[in-house]
């Protein structure tokens, strides 16, 4: 899971929007879910999952998968299975090149030195002082390390990503100390300059607290498909600084690394189970709960928390339905536990029936961070390329939990405090956030799949990707509240029909009031007023697909969405007066691009970038400028993701430029056009016609 880029304030109605009445569901349904869902049960399961080092295709992942499957069977769910998808480095699942499984038997790194005193007698004796042990803390060995038995001198090369870092330093046959991720230096350090291994103190996933804890060891990665196979150990800042100080004084440091590990053909494993729907016509439609089960040990918040929470949602809904306290919903509810991104791509590409069935997803990635993590809980909206009401459903429940939990913290008296005996009592304070990337929700909402997703997530988290991301820092109350929001949202969507349209349309009206406010806030940050006009125009154009998204789960036989479109659009237009539009004249026309049916998936996936590989194969040595562009509210990765998503065969290239400018900030048209042409060259999109001038 990656950083949050943009955080947007809650709806303009603010605290008290729902009063004492829960939204969308009957109060007896809310009471049943709130009373049954358990933060303690979720945390016990989290502690079990966090015991395993859960790398893709590994023995540890399989053991975690078996634990989850056993729990699902015990809770009485249907269709429990561990699906397997071959992963050998050659098979593709859409844009994902399958990564071979990776397992570790053992790994240790020691410093070799001499002592002058043995049992009171002064003499020289060679000793090895252990620095890192995979058995004690698996995070010390970078993912995709290979076997080795090496004795070598340590050389500090700084960041290690530029040739200048190696100037005047002999690293041939030696181990390099670097501040960058191992994968970012291996081709240079090992492939070009002959180093035999890497020691890294990379500080990835930076927050305001980065570097404060000198003993944290961060998760490291080598490049899965690099030809320069090697090993890499991760060390703390304290260890790295001690090495650097000794090296500056001219001391030689000799290390021994013994690693038994490597890649091998294996399988992506995806645990899945269902609560079958009641309606014969609708039970083939599914509302899915998703997490990612893989991560280093302990990986408690990232992401044992998401998996343990949807496991608790499964237990809660299955029990309440079985006991008759909740009516069995019309649609089937499915639970999915894959390796992050690559497992989801394998599932949707390898079993297209899942793509056909799933109508919406509740995805949880980091939902249990307690006060020590400094986490803020987010309900994240979908990308602008896929307007949907489903996130507003989740936000309605989250805002209600905000109100109830605040009133309880402030007064000690409230109907639904949603507090666990072993957890805290502070307010939830959830935020409604603009779309941000970094987990499986990117896959579902990619235009080749088009499945709207609710994304529940914590950010920041000062322990993310470190050995300190432990169960001790997880709050049972937080798990209970995240579980409630997810369970209530998923259950509502699973039984949603025309009877619920008015309530959902009311949510969309609230959203447009906030949208109008955001238009003014964004426009105030833009120097050219006409770019602000394009933001307003684009948001106005969003009203129809947003209202149309209702029909994904409700037939709307009475056409209730049509007047809603007018009301929603009016709310935006009435609040954006004085922002100009413009006319564009493009020499050479205004092309329209359409994404092809295959390959399916985002261009940047796990351990592999489909665009970069295909682009390099065509002899290009430089990237399209858009990929390195930094806008006001997003960077190259976000722009590229949405440019491809907006290539729907209807929008012109300039309309795509305006759309991504509204989402992430003004960007030169030439950059957008260049990237679209590059996508066309690698066969991902095709030009269909010339658009009319505006």
Image: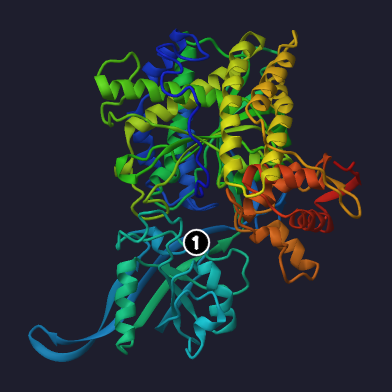
Q: Nearer the viewer, residue 415 or 174?
A: 415
Give percent across and percent down for residue 333.
58, 23
Q: Position of residue 574 (x, y in %)?
A: 65, 24
* Quarter holding residue 403: top left
Q: Is residue 334 visible to us here?
A: no
Please report the residue visible at 49 percent of the width from the left and 91 percent of the height from the top. Answer: 168
Left or right of residue 4, residue 627 in this image: right
Report the coloring of the rendering.
rainbow
Residue 20 visible? The answer is yes
Which residue shows up at 43% across the image and 21% down it?
400
Q: Residue at x 37, y 51 (%)?
A: 463
Viewport quadrant of the C terminus? top right
Q: Is residue 625 left or right of residue 78?
A: right
Relative depth, front residue between 604 and 693? 693
> Compared to 58, does 694 lie above or below?
above
Q: How many marks?
A: 1
State the residue at coordinates (29%, 72%).
Answer: 130
Q: Residue under circle 1? A: 143
Which of 377 and 407 lies nearest the eye of the viewer? 407
Q: Secondary structure at mark 1?
A: loop
Is 149 left or right of 608, judged from the image as shown? left
In the rendered image of this protein, does residue 444 appear above or below residue 96?
above
Q: Judge the density around disc 1: few (<14), some (14-19), many (≥20) Cα neighbours within 10 Å.
A: many
- Location of residue 80 by image quarter: top right
């Amino acid at each position: 899971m990656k950083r949050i880029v943009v955080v947007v304030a809650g709806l303009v109605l603010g605290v008290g929007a729902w009063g004492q009445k829960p939204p969308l569901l009957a109060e007896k349904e809310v009471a049943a879910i709130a009373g049954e869902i358990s933060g303690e049960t979720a945390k016990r399961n989290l502690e079990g999952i966090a015991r395993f080092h859960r790398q893709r295709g590994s023995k540890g992942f399989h053991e975690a998968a078996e634990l989850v499957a056993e729990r699902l069977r015990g809770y009485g769910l249907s269709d429990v299975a561990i699906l397997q998808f071959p992963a050998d480095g050659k098979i593709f699942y859409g844009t994902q090149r399958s990564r071979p499984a990776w397992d570790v038997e053992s790994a240790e790194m020691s410093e070799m030195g001499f002592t002058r005193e043995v049992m009171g007698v002064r003499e020289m004796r060679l000793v090895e002082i252990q620095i890192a042990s995979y058995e004690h803390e698996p995070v010390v060995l970078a993912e995709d390390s290979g076997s080795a038995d090496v004795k070598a001198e340590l050389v500090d090369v700084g960041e290690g990503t530029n040739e200048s870092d190696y100037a005047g330093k002999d690293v041939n046959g030696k181990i390099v100390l670097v501040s960058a991720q191992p994968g970012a230096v291996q081709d240079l350090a090992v492939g070009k300059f002959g180093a035999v291994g890497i020691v890294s103190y990379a500080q990835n996933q930076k927050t305001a607290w980065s570097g404060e804890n000198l003993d944290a060891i961060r998760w490291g990665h080598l490049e899965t498909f690099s030809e320069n196979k090697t090993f890499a150990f991760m060390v703390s800042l304290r260890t790295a600084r001690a090495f650097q100080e000794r090296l500056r004084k001219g001391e030689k440091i000799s290390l021994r690394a013994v690693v038994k590990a490597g890649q091998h053909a294996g399988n992506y494993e995806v645990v899945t189970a269902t609560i079958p729907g009641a309606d014969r016509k609708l039970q083939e439609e599914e509302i899915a709960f998703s997490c990612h089960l893989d991560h280093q040990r302990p990986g408690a918040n990232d992401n044992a928390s998401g998996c343990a929470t949807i496991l608790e949602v499964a237990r809660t809904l299955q029990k309440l339905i079985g006991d008759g306290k909740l009516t069995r919903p019309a649609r089937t509810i499915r639970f999915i536990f894959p390796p992050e991104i690559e497992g989801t791509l394998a599932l949707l590409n390898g079993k297209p029936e899942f793509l056909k069935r799933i109508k919406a997803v509740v995805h949880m990635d980091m939902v249990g961070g307690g006060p020590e993590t400094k986490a803020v809980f987010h309900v994240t909206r979908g990308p602008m390329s896929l307007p949907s009401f489903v996130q507003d459903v989740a936000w309605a429940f989250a805002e209600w939990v905000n109100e109830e939990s605040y009133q309880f913290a402030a007064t000690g008296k409230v109907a639904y405090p949603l507090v666990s005996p072993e957890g805290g009592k502070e307010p939830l304070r959830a935020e409604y956030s603009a779309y941000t990337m970094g987990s499986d929700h990117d896959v579902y909402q990619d235009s080749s799949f088009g499945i709207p997703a609710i994304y529940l997530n914590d950010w920041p988290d000062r322990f993310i990707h470190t050995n300190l991301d432990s169960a001790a820092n997880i709050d049972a109350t937080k798990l209970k509240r995240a579980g409630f929001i997810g369970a209530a949202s998923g259950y509502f969507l699973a039984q949603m029909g025309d009877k619920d349209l008015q309530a959902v349309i009311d949510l969309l009206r609230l959203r447009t009031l906030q949208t109008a406010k955001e238009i003014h806030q964004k426009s105030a940050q833009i120097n050219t007023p006409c770019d602000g006009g394009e933001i307003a125009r684009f948001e106005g154009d969003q009203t129809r697909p947003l209202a149309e998204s209702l029909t994904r789960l409700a037939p709307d036989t009475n056409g209730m969405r049509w007047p809603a479109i007018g009301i929603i659009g009016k709310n935006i237009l009435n609040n954006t007066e004085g922002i100009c539009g413009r006319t564009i004249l493009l020499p050479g026309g205004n092309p329209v691009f359409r994404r092809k049916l295959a390959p399916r998936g985002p261009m940047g996936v796990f351990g592999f970038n489909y665009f970069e590989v295909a682009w390099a194969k065509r002899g290009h040595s430089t990237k399209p400028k858009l990929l390195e562009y930094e806008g006001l509210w997003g960077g190259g990765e976000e722009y590229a993701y949405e440019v491809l998503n907006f290539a729907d065969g209807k929008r012109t290239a300039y309309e795509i430029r305006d759309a991504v400018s509204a989402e992430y900030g003004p960007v030169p048209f030439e950059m957008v056009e260049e990237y679209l042409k590059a996508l066309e060259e690698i066969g991902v999109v095709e030009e269909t016609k010339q658009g009319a001038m505006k």
